[in-house]
Amino acid sequence: MQKGRITRYQPFPLIDLPDRQWPSRSIVAPPIWCSVDLRDGNQALPIPMSVEEKLEMFDVLVGIGFKEIEIGFPSASQIEFDFTRRLIEEQRIPDDVVVQVLVQAREELIYRTFEALRGAKKAIVHLYNSTSPIQRRIVFGMDKPEILGIAVRGAKLVKELVHSLPETQVIFQYSPESFSATEVDFALEICEAVVDVWQPTPDNKIILNLPDTVQYATPNVHADQIEWFCRHMRNRENAIISVHTHNDRGTGVAATELGLMAGAERVEGTLFGNGERTGNVDIVTVALNMYMQGIDPGLDFSNLAAIRAVYERCTRMEVPVRQPYAGELVFTAFSGSHQDAIKKGMDAQDPTPGALWEVPYLPIDPRDLGRSYEAIIRINSQSGKGGVAYVLESEFGLHLPKTMHVEFGKVIKALADARGNELSSAQIHEAFAQEYLEQEGPLKLESFHSEDLADGDGSVACVARLRIDGVLREVRAQGNGPIDAFVRALNQEDIAAFKVLSYAEHSLGQGAEAQAAAYIQIQMESEKSLFGAAIETNIELASVKAVLSALNRVL
Ligand SMILES: CC(=O)SCCNC(=O)CCNC(=O)[C@H](O)C(C)(C)COP(=O)(O)OP(=O)(O)OC[C@H]1O[C@@H](n2cnc3c(N)ncnc32)[C@H](O)[C@@H]1OP(=O)(O)O
Ligand SMILES: CC(C)C(=O)C(=O)O
């Protein structure tokens, strides 16, 4: 890289628009969405999609709710042509979906495009030529009037050929490709020249697609360009202004959103941002960003994983794990403080359908996108007690009392530190079982029996048979409940000197098969306090075993 004074690159010139309006606007309604997965996305793949793969993707796009789908560049190759023919001949295009085809402003390609469209009910013919100074100079070796001439000749031929498709309703779309790198006044001039040929009306609008073909500037400049264009255009009511952003600077989504605030009404993009170089704008993100602000985007991503699976299979691309909304890790917290807040948020969340979603660190409910809550908390050495408690609760139904979270959190922290990697929920459960449920000595319960005393004040007598370091012993006592009686028995027989600080229990599962979980916190004479836990078929046994679990841990 060059150092110090950079001469290889230069700042992008600003647009003269001192009274720009877009900064104080917000997005209040969804745009018209147009998927360009099958064209811009496809043309950027190392192995372009086969006809069968394109068909599968087309069906997915229709299922999501796209009403405009750019299906390809039919004059580019036989596959592209055949795909267009298959859709038309096999009547796979729903009546409310319009297919769009791209073509350069070149005579032979335009003829071939119209041949491909024969029999279609409705189609958008998308004509383009590049307009920026660098393209004019380096690629075309032409001046502005010559470039304008390419567009106008192409537009005239398209208009002429519409008559060759009497059964097709043709909508015109023109893109001054490399718009965002073109002088705005020239981009407007060339678009108006095309408009003059096509003569759109408010009932038969032209689509003017203003591509950010390569991103050179910050998204605010893109917004200025769009607003400038919309405000200076003649007969604005005759056009739908469309944005088509790429992502070279990583700001495709931002540029699209600001473009909408600046007056665009239509968005072209792809699923997960596939497309040339760094990709086209990711339509999933733009749409779900709207949803997250309470706007129905009109696209359905309620089973994003299924959409992603088809996308990955057909394009042979992978959705990165941090991809907004769709990535494997985007609803997962490993770090303790995030987990703590998520657990509290999930506990506090109103479960009523339609209730406002208010979970910290999760801007959107993963369930809305067809994802479960299972993976929202995953455990490693960065995790905290809240996260560990969440895993035990959500996956195993174990509701550890809050005061116990600290103790078991430390157990898991030590294990994660020692292993140096992520702990699965099964490993966490296993650690819980080893720590609390499977302590077999020095105290082992052989039998326990309690019965109410006749005095009617709720007191009970208990008799327990224990093995202590392998030696059988029977203990008895009375108390105001089975646990109290058992604790007294152990204390008065000098087996252990302790008191109970807290106790919690709950059932696990439902019906006759349900088990009971009990958690007990004891304090030894030495002031040391710790927990025990047990899971048994009845609550009395679980409580007694929880006491022994705690004692065995301390003894
Ligand atoms: C920004 C975008 O994504 S635009 C879409 C790009 N997509 C694709 O290119 C995918 C499909 N393309 C193809 O299959 C081929 O490029 C074809 C079939 C379109 C054309 O193939 P070919 O003619 O063999 O080659 P090629 O693309 O190199 O043609 C370049 C010529 O077209 C001219 N050209 C490029 N774009 C346009 C345009 N929009 N309008 C008119 N002429 C154009 C170039 O100036 C160049 O002219 P020259 O030969 O006089 O120098
Ligand atoms: C053809 C146009 C719309 C294009 O794909 C681009 O400019 O990126």
Image (tube, rainbow, N blue to C red):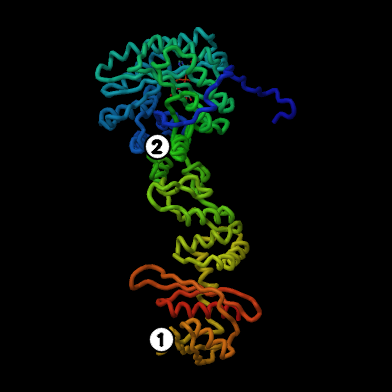
Q: Is residue 170 visible?
A: yes
Badge 2 density bin: few <14, some 14–19, many ≥20, Cα 10 Å: some
Q: Quadrant of residue 515?
A: bottom left
* Mark 1 vs ligand 2: CB below 8 Å: no
Camera-nearest residue between 162 and 411: 411
The amino acid at mark 1 is: Gly
- Nearer the observer: mark 1 or 2; the answer is 1
Label 1's element? loop
Which residue is painted at 58% across and 59% down in the image?
384
Disc ID at residue 372: none
Camera-nearest residue between 302 and 155: 302
Camera-nearest residue between 377 and 231: 231
Label 2's element? loop
Which residue is painted at 45% across and 74% down in the image?
535
**Which residue is at the far right?**
4
Work out whether 201 lies above or below 52. Answer: above
- From the top left corner, tell me how far across and down residue 531 is, in percent: 56, 73
* Image position of 230 (left or right of 8): left
- From the top left corner, tell me how far across and down residue 68 is, in percent: 36, 28
Q: Quadrant of residue 421?
A: bottom right
- From the top left corner, tell me how far across and down residue 456 is, in percent: 41, 86
- From the top left corner, tell me how far across and down residue 445 is, in percent: 49, 85
Q: Which residue is mark 1?
A: 456
In the rendered structure, which disc, 1 or 2, sits on the residue that comes first in sequence?
2
Q: Is residue 86 visible?
A: no
Q: Which residue is mark 2?
A: 296
Which residue is painted at 60% across and 84% down in the image?
497
Work out whether 413 lies above or below 131. Answer: below
The amino acid at mark 2 is: Asp
* Image position of 57 (left or right of 429): left
